[in-house]
Image (spheres, grey):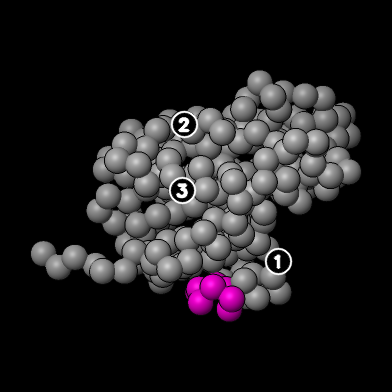
């Protein structure tokens, strides 16, 4: 049996704070495949890192499927896409709800569905501490992150041989805090979050849930 010498590494949401930090930390560890919403930032990052890149709408299943098919067997997949549109339930419209669920859940589902997992593959999905996000104004965000945990629980039972790790993140200083006026004091640096995520996913037995 021929072994592949190059590790295929995929990062969804590579232009976000943690996604970018992961991409930078993973440079040189394999062939990087990056996706993100911000096309200009995505291609600039890819050029800097010598990575492959494709801007895509995560609501488009055909695009996600084609992207993953082009890669072939995936060794490491990082799902770092995310969105939050804070509003009370009474003022949360369908567009905001769907955009939140597309970024936080639907894209993750498509990655799980269409990735062709290599032997010993590992996937990482960014979540949150459920009790910390059950707050007024975060109904759609909390619902999507709780649903992600349920999705991964099922996926672990279906995708035998693939290690799937959910990361419960504390406050991390990224752009997702922009609607709140910026990250809270003492927020973790995205580079530190990336370092700890990579340390855990490359352990001999990665945990199902990593709490940072």
Q: Nearer the viewer, mark 1 or mark 3?
A: 3
125 sits left or right of 81 in the view: left
Label placed on residue 198: 3
Q: Mark 3 falls on what kind of element? A: helix
Q: Which residue is mark 2?
A: 209
In the rendered image, residue 105 lying in the magenta stretch gets the answer no
Q: Earlier in the sequence, mark 2 or mark 1?
A: 1
Label 1, secondary structure: give it: loop
Query: Which region shows up in magenta?
Result: 46-53
Asked if residue 61 lies left or right of residue 42, the reply is left
Split into 4 quadrants, where in the image is the N terminus?
Answer: bottom left
Tell me residue 198's x, y (percent).
46, 48
Location of mark 1 (residue): 38
Within 10 angstroms of label 2, few (less than 14), some, or many (20 or more) residues?
A: some
Give the alpha-carbon distance from disc 3 to disc 2, as whole Å: 13 Å
Place residue 179 in its image quadrant: top right
Would residue 94 be visible to someone looking at this image?
A: no
Q: Gap between marks 2 and 1, in whole Å?
A: 29 Å
**Quarter of the image with the C terminus in it:** top right
Asked if 118 appears above or below 143 in the picture, the reply is: below
Q: Residues within 10 Å of mark 3 (few under 14, many from 20)?
A: some
């Amino acid at each position: 049996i021929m072994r592949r010498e190059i590790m295929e590494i995929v990062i969804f949401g590579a232009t976000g704070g943690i996604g970018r930090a992961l991409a930078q930390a993973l440079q040189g560890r394999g062939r990087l495949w990056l996706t993100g919403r911000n096309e200009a930032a995505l291609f600039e990052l890819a050029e800097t890192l010598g990575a492959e890149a494709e801007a895509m709408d995560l609501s488009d299943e055909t695009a996600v499927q084609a992207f993953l098919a082009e890669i072939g067997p995936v060794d490491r997949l990082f799902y770092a896409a995310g969105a939050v549109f804070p509003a009370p339930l009474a003022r949360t419209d369908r567009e905001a709800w769907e955009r939140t669920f597309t970024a936080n859940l639907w894209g993750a589902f498509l990655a799980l569905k269409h990735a062709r997992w290599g032997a010993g593959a590992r996937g990482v999905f960014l979540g949150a501490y459920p009790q910390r996000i059950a707050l007024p104004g975060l109904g759609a965000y909390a619902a999507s992150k709780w649903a992600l945990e349920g999705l991964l629980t099922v996926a672990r039972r279906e995708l035998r041989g693939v290690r799937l790790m959910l990361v419960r993140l504390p406050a991390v200083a990224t752009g997702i805090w922009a609607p709140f006026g910026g990250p809270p004091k003492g927020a973790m640096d995205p580079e530190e979050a990336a370092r700890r995520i990579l340390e855990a996913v490359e352990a001999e037995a990665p945990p199902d849930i990593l709490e940072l």
